[in-house]
Amino acid sequence: MSELVWGPLMATYLFLGGIAGGAYLISALVDLFKGDDYEVLSKSGALVSTVAVIASVVVLLLEIKRFEVAPLSFLYAFSEFPGSMISVGTWILTSLLVVSLVTVILAFFGGNWLIRKIVDVVGIVLSLGTAAYTGLVLSYCRGIPFWCSPFLPALFTVSGILTGLTMAMLMIPVAAYVMPKALNSFWELYERKASYVGMIGQMEKYCQVLTVVEIALLALYIGTTPTTGLLLAGSSVSLLFYVYIALGLLLPLGISYLNSRMEHQGKDMIIVLSAMIGQVLVLLGGFILRYVVLIGGQLIH
Amino acid sequence: MTEKITRKDFLKAAGASLVVTPMALEGLDRGQKSPVQHLGEQNAVVVDVTRCIGCKACQVACKGWNKLPAEKTEVSRDGEFTNPTFFSPITWKIVRFKEIGDYDENAAGTGGLKWRMLSDNCKHCLEPSCVSVCPAAALWKRSDGPVLYDLDRCVGCGYCTMACPWGIPHFDDDLHAIRKCTMCHDRIDQGLEPSCVSVCPTDSLQYMNLEEARRIAIDAEANGLYTYGVDEVGGTSWIYISDVPFPEFGLPDYSTVTQKGFESDILMKFAGASLFVGGAILAAIKLYAERRELIMKSEGGN
């Protein structure tokens, strides 16, 4: 191959797709199991999912090279379901957008609780499908051996859930600032320490589990895929790969662990701020992972 | 006020979904129709590498018949005679030059080396990956051999380039669509051979019935020669015969599995991995919840 067919925009698309799936999954799960204490996270997750799906579609259209001359040509993708993975992804993303929008409406404007639960369950399936799709779309590419692994979609799914959860957590204060009437203001949230800081602590533990699983899947993926030697030591993205491991996985894991040690010690503001730093690092790592896999795969080939 | 579903109920439903979803996808996969245009019996081109003299007439004929402009290239400084070295929207055929070592060291004047040339282009797979993955049905397979495409239907997503085992289709920025070798279908329709075949001075390239081509290749294998395209990715309409292994020309080893079989394999293994990982995550969360409950109870007791 003489040039990169898929560039940074495609990496962004996969990153946003993962966030959309992960954020909705968290939104639905906390709505089903956690109740009112986590309402703010559920709302934030649904909002993040909606915005991420829309942004991912915009980014994809920018990446599609024919868009400038035939902007509606991408609609053909709806007709080939389920033959092509991109068609499957088109349907899943569109469905997730609809479900996310319905969830936002139900969450912010109220509605029948049973309908909300049904939407949650449908959305969970779609959100897992979206996160998995971002990996499967690559692993079906037989021309790029580096991507042809069942562990790649598993890795992207777990990374998508982690980045989605992280983005939903990170956006709580932002959404509270932008929509103080719909959500509580940040200071109101902060003053309700028992619920907000407690929620951060709880979610950080889930993040720790997901990060450990992501590290295990990364090891399986790298260990079982051919041509990874070049990625580890011989390509221009090698350094980024190590940045991902250090800053995107290990450092947030360490911060999260230290945070959990500080619980109930009256250091709530430190916990909130350091959790935010960890969340930004997780998001940075999530993007670098997709960039390294996408660009590295093509370069190694 | 929110209603809660018990963790046990959710785990049951999640487990059932994990089992049923891959089965449903597998069922859909089997039901997929192959986009084939039926136009008579399957033909093929046999490329006998041992007869190629590297004249590049095929490369020039391809440019000429398809009105493809010249490629701006650079002369390699490491003894590479392949030029251009890459496929592009305007280069559909490459003659790969390879100096092979460890050859008959006693032959006079060879220094243990020999040249071999391979006329390379789209292999026109019997079950093409590009056709399988295209989200717009812009590519299709003709039953008589060629894999063709519709310029107006191409979305420009690049998925065909990535899925093609040899990265053949390339997006043309001027035409705003992918382009690649068409096996000179317009010549075939007139009862002619592909242009590259028609100009080959040594009959290194021969156009014939697919069955005959496969029989020739199998006979060659029996005589100790290497073949490429008989089984690779389910078989191709361009079948190569050589006295040196094909990885020497940069053609990778591929299994006999078709793209659909390859996709099903990835999907099933992913489903298995997901069951394992999902179970591990749920177990970890359950353990954490139980531990937390114990701690809360002990704190409450104190």
Image: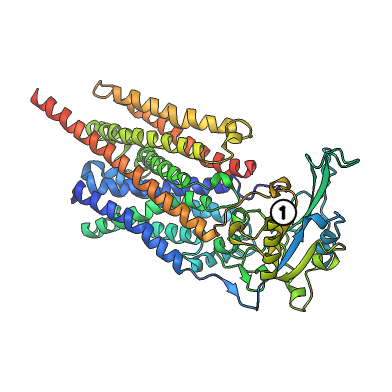
Provide residue B122's location: percent of width, then percent of height.
70, 60
User: In terms of depth relative to the viewer, which is nearer, B262 or B28?
Assistant: B262
Identify which residue is drawn at 44% across, 31% down: A249
Disc 1 element: loop
Q: Is residue A279 left or right of residue B279?
A: right
Identify which residue is drawn at 67% across, 61% down: B218
Is any part of residue A44 visible from this angle? no
User: In terms of depth relative to the viewer, which is nearer, A92 or B46?
Assistant: B46
Amino acid on which the number 1 mark rests in the picture:
Leu
Image quadrant occupied by the C terminus of chain B? top left
Q: Is residue A14 left or right of residue B84?
A: left
Number of disc labels: 1
**Which residue position holds label 1?**
B225
Provide residue A292's location: percent of width, then percent of height.
56, 39
Identify which residue is drawn at 70% across, 61% down: B219
The chain containing the residue under callout 1 comes to B
Provide residue B171's location: percent of width, then percent of height.
68, 57
Q: Quadrant of residue B210?
A: bottom right
Is any part of residue A151 visible from this angle? yes
